[in-house]
Image (spheres, rainbow, N blue to C red):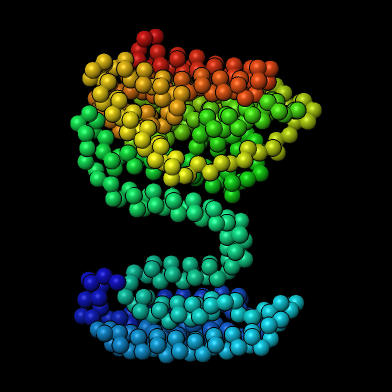
Amino acid sequence: MNEDSVSAFLAAGPEGLLEPYRLVALLGLSFFLGLAFEEYFGDRRLKAPGGVRTFPLLALLGALLYALAPETAALFLAGLAVLGVWLAIWYWHRLSIQQAEPRIEHSPGVRLDGGIMALVTNLVAYLLGPVTLTQPLWIPVAIGVTAVLFMGARERLHAFAETVGGTELATLAKFLIIIGIVLPLVPNEPVVSVTSITPYQVWLAVVVVSTLSYLSYLVQRYVAPRHGLLYSAALGGLYSSTAATIVISRRAGTAENNSHLLNAAIVLATSVMFLRILIVVAIFNRPLAFALAPSLVALLAAGLILSAWLYWRGSGNAGANGGDVLPPANPLEIQTALIFALLFIGLSVAVGWARPEFGEGSLFALAALAGVTDIDPLVLSVAQSAHGDAELYFDAAAILFAATSNNVLKGIYTLTFAGLARGLVPAGALFLLSGAGIAAILLTIGLV
């Protein structure tokens, strides 16, 4: 609780603390918690302490003890100690029963109490008293609802933990390190005169790209893991269209059927890349995103039309099956983030140095180079650089050029991994998208 709320309640005295609407809210929340407790623990062999009568009384007791001595909360803490001793005695009794009858927990239709959930829920009911009296009402409501949800989701949460496993938890920890620990610590001041990009902007770019990639990976793996190859290709294009193209092309080189589906998936992954570019640029530079939007939306539409045509032209073939999926590869690794950051720094310095030395044309040379590696560092470097309106469309054209160069590279990858016979159609579609990208560039800089 904050100091202002404490001071206000102390000035009001016990009468101010025990406001009628707060008592009504407290009794309602504790009764709601008791109902959920009865439903969850009702069929246990050893009846757990608590329920629809106990919890309202327990919450009311916590509120009254706190209201009688709000300055020190001594009475409330004494009550908490007594409750803790009572729960400890009950838990010791539960363990003694389990040790005396070790097989009873596994008997059909017989369950004990479910770990320490009963203890924790009793403590929550008691603590709801002072929280409801001293805090905005949304806080105790959120606490009560969260407790009920966790109480009823035991089986689902355990199943989810078994599905996720230690590897995914370690990956989530890396993600939290990238966002919550590293980002606040890096300085937000330029360290070299060649570029105005700061270390904070570098890591913020890593955070944005990692977040988009990680979310698409989680959706593909856990939310809808069996929705077919096209669905997987679209999500794969959100975190790396190049990686998705390589994986699908390898499969196309050995597949006995479903060539139309694989070809459509290759083009779809690249089509989604245009949407990814637009999202990333919009986060850092809205004027540049508006300048890019017509071209990127047109290229996205063209890619979707090509993908649909490739799919429908062979959908009548025998053996067509949309159930095949693209196994998602986890895109979130610390070394990947560091490599991305280094590429981003290198391209930012290169853009800052080459632009005043060689003019706007140098940006297109760097864009072509970025297209054969990873276009995201160049896209973010251009988006975060401060440019005037006169240079805005050159920046947009450079990003389009990087995407076009990347599409040419993916066409070459497709021919390499799928073979000339099976890769010619999807590679031709990617080269066609590259030609559309060149036309978009010329329109953007006003040469057509």
**Quadrant in the picture for the N terminus:** bottom left
Q: Is residue 358 visible?
A: yes
Q: Residue at x 45, y 89 (%)?
A: 85
Q: Is 280 rendered above or below residue 89?
A: above
Q: Is 342 rendered above or below residue 48?
A: above
Q: Is residue 265 left or right of residue 350?
A: right
Q: Is residue 210 left or right of residue 155?
A: left
Q: Is residue 110 visible?
A: no
**Quadrant in the picture for the C terminus:** top left
Q: Is residue 143 left or right of residue 196?
A: right
Task: Work out whether residue 339 or residue 59 is closer to the camera in this orientation and state it.
Answer: 339
Q: Check the image and name the residue furthest to the right.
A: 318
Task: Work out whether residue 138 or residue 285 is closer to the camera in this orientation and state it.
Answer: 285
Report x, y in % for residue 56: 47, 83
Q: Residue at x 72, y 23 (%)?
A: 314
Numbered label tally = 0
Report x, y in % for residue 299: 49, 23
Q: Is 196 rendered above or below residue 51?
A: above
Q: Residue at x 70, y 35 (%)?
A: 322
Task: Answer with the quarter of the image where residue 191 lies.
Answer: top left
Report x, y in % for residue 150: 53, 68
Q: Residue at x 28, y 47 (%)?
A: 186
Report x, y in % for residue 228: 66, 38
Task: Work out whether residue 376 or residue 229 is closer to the camera in this orientation and state it.
Answer: 376
